[in-house]
Amino acid sequence: MRFWLIGFVLLIIALYFLRSVLLPFVAGMAIAYFLDPLCDRIEKMGCSRTWATTIVTALFLLAVIALAAVLLPPLEAQIVDFFGQLPSYIQAVNAKLGPLVKALRSHLPASAAPSISDVTSYIGRIAGWGADTLGSVLSGGFALANLISLIFITPIVTFYLLRDWDKITMKIDLWLPRDHAEEIRGQLREIDRTLAGFARGQATVCLCLAFYYGVGLSLIGLDFGLVLGLIAGVLSFIPFVGSLTALFGSIALALAQFGNWQGVAMVVGLCAVGQVIEGNFLTPKLVGDRVRLHPVWVIFALLAGGALFGFVGLLLAVPVAAVGGVLARYGLGRYLGSDIYRGLNPPADGGN
């Protein structure tokens, strides 16, 4: 126990001090983990591991480049237009919310009633807090040097990890203590099942929601609907955050753009349908309860990982949460089967 605890503490210390250079390696490991099943299938068709890795890596890079070529130009145009029209949007929202704030003031004591300037100030504070939080998270992982290393080093790391994935797992298996090897393998299989089920399933959910919100908001006629939809889809890997982002962001844009409650009702209806689809079809079918990662545990892991390690922490949060959940369930099972739980002198059968 001392050996594993000391090794775990040293690993955490090393990750903390090396967090500024870990991004391309963590990203490459995550991509290799996702692509390994496809590489195994190609290898079973008679292709060598090196050629299978080359084919899968090339196809992945081509898909990323094609997606960037399709999405980046309209995204860039919409982002530039959004910041250009932001002052007029703020004025429009203030004009629309002004009567509501006045009506609220008439029903509240003077000391407790907010003014439109108070509401604007609160919104500004929330936006500033969000910007500061996002900046502090990204500053740990998206400095210029790390961005360059992410672009150039990640594909190399992905290729070599994919090529040697089976060798790495076999070597690690040989290092396991022989008396407990089978038990450790069982826990590693459970971790892999939990992590693969959550990560791959949640990634599919995020893609589906990004497509739904982006296309749906654009068809309604909402300006910047594509950007908002993609952001909501990406943030859907954090439970409830993606749907709330789509809801409140689209309501604010609809108030500023349409100037009537019919437009707001349309975006609220679209977001409500999206939440029903996510909660009743996408998440149960693609993720399901079998992964046994509670949303509160996932949110805590993401916030803690982002606070400690920046963007690298966000990438490591779900794997660490999966490992922690599996080990916690294993430890609880051992405790419930031990004398510590049952007592040293359990009552005899038929005793009171």
Image (cartoon, rainbow, N blue to C red):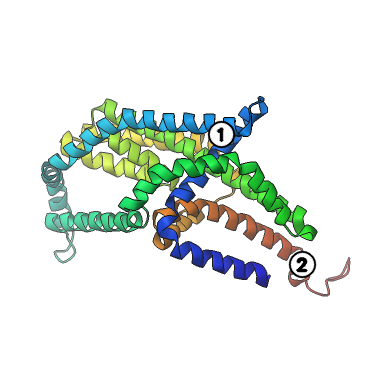
* Residue 332 pos. (x, y %): 68, 62
Front in this rendered view, residue 68 or 327 = 68
At horizontal 33% and vertical 36% (from top left) the residue drawn is 229
Q: Quadrant of the C terminus?
A: bottom right
Q: Position of residue 24 (x, y in %)?
A: 44, 49
Residue plotted at (88% across, 66% down): 350
Residue for badge 1: 53
Tag 1's secondary structure? Answer: helix
Q: Residue extending furthest bottom?
A: 344
Q: Is residue 283 left or right of residue 145?
A: right
Q: For the residue carrying disc 1, how many other residues have a C-alpha within 10 Å: few (<14), some (14-19), or many (20+)?
A: many
Foreground residue, 273 or 172? 172
Q: Amino acid at mark 1?
A: Thr
Q: Quadrant of the N terminus?
A: bottom right
How packed is label 2: few (under 14 Cα within 10 Å), some, or many (20 or more)? few
- Spatial CA distance of label 1 from label 2 is 46 Å
- Residue 327, numbered circle: none
Q: Is residue 116 left or right of residue 58?
A: left
Amino acid carrying mark 2 in the image? Ser
Q: Is residue 269 visible?
A: yes
Total numbered labels: 2
Residue beneath label 2, please?
Answer: 338
Q: Residue at x 26, y 31 (%)?
A: 73
